[in-house]
Image (cartoon, grey):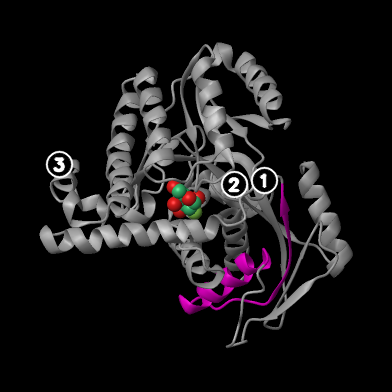
Amino acid sequence: MESRIEQDLIAAFRRSFEREPRLFRAPGRINLIGEHTDYNDGFVMPAALDLSIWAAIAPRSDRRLRIGSLVMDEVVEFDLDDANAQPRGDWTDYVRGVAIFLERAGYELNGADLVLDGNLPIGAGLSASAAFEVSAGFALLTISGAEVDRVELAKICQRAENQFVGVRCGIMDQYISCCAVEGSALLLDCRSLVSRKVTIDPDARLVICDTMVRHQLASDEYNSRREDCERAVAVLSTRLDGVSALRDVTFAQLIRHADAMPELIFRRARHVVGEIDRTLRAAAALDAGDLKECGRLMYLSHESLRDDYEVSCAELDLMVDIARSLPGVYGARMMGGGFGGCTINLVEASRAEAFAQAMADRYRAATGVTPPILTCVPGPGAGPVGDLGAARVLAE
Ligand code: GAF
């Protein structure tokens, strides 16, 4: 039995294209800790949300892509053979970008009719863009008769976002959308792309609180943080052997060479080097069932993102301050790229409901905004929905 959103998508597809689609789904993500470390070859600890983007798709006999959504009246059309493809500056770029970069990677795609939509809020830092890319990529590959290599698909989706959409994101969001494991977070080494499961104590809940702040300039700020990291690496690699990313630098080495770089660049690097270390410690703490230590590291992560990396905002700081003052909270921090979006809170299971109520009340009293709050139960990665393909994935 399809969910409501799946039924709506199928109905919209039938209306637009007068035939039957297949359905694919890709989840958004949360991240326990490890922020702005992925593009520095560091470690992250994401899990899949049970909110997703779905793609309804049917193949065409020509090389055209026709893309619609539940909320968009028009159907946008592209030619897969257009050698001069330019981004339109809207969400269809994620779909078209992935198609272009799948072909550049050697896949021969069929043309297709697609309708995409989901229940993942856009611009909330829950990685809707990666979910658009991955659901479209999974769908296009499958109807073109190709095997889906999940890690390869994640890399191609990241390339599309970097080079077609123009955001120089790391691999975390696309990786977890493709490779998430139900019931666990993953500790991902963003250099080797090897991950392992991290189990969250059943006595704790991951509570996501949305500030409702959507920052317009976030992608420019994001790209500029990445350049800051590259400047730090350029300096450190002239002084230390074997440094190709901030992952290769220890805290002691960074401090020793602090005078070689501008203070701002030093602070950016201090965040990244410290955050990689915090992420590994948090994984060890969770392995040992030490929720207090994991929470302490989450608070430190927030302070570093706020003060050294400067990607927080007043509303995120307010939410973390409120969390600190509430009973049963192990730790809290801003999550994702920053400048708005959500916090992630590690909360005692028995207090999670009271926490959500108190957070909503106090945030509303301070800002006038009612924050959406949800508890994340880590879900599975992308795949086909409700057909033989789904059975195959479940059996893997
Ligand atoms: C965004 C990016 F897409 C990720 O790659 C990651 O860098 C994150 O911000 C910050 O940790 O979600």
Q: Which residue is mark 3?
A: 252
In front: label 3 or label 1: 3
Disc ID at residue 120: 1
Left or right: where 73 falls relative to 101: right
Work out how far the residue at label 3 is from the one at label 1, CA to CA, in angstroms: 41 Å
Callout 1 secondary element? loop
User: How dense is the environment of label 3, judged by Cα within 10 Å: few (below 14), some, or many (20 and up)?
Assistant: few
Residue 221 in magenta?
A: no
Tell me which label, 2 or 3, sits earlier in the chain.
2
Label number found at residue 27: 2
Q: Residue at x 49, y 48 (%)?
A: 337
* Residue 169 vertical placement versus 293 (above, below): below
Magenta stretch, residue numbers: 90-118
Above or below: residue 289 compared with residue 138: above
Quadrant location of the N terminus? top right
**Relative to 128, is 312 on the left or the right?**
left
Tag 2 secondary structure? strand
Helix, strand or loop at mark 3 = helix
* Residue 135 visible in the current orientation: yes
Residue 97 percent location from the top left of the image: 57, 71
Which percent across, then down, holds residue 267?
31, 46
**Which of the pair 299/346 is nearer the observer?**
299
Q: Residues within 10 Å of mark 1 (few under 14, many from 20)?
A: many
The amino acid pointed to by label 3 is Ala
Sequence-wise first label, 2 or 1: 2
Q: Nearer the viewer, mark 2 or mark 3?
A: 3
Instruction: Classify 31 as above or below 56.
Output: above
- Residues at badges 2 and 1 in contact (C-beta under 8 Å)? yes
Q: Is residue 145 visible?
A: no
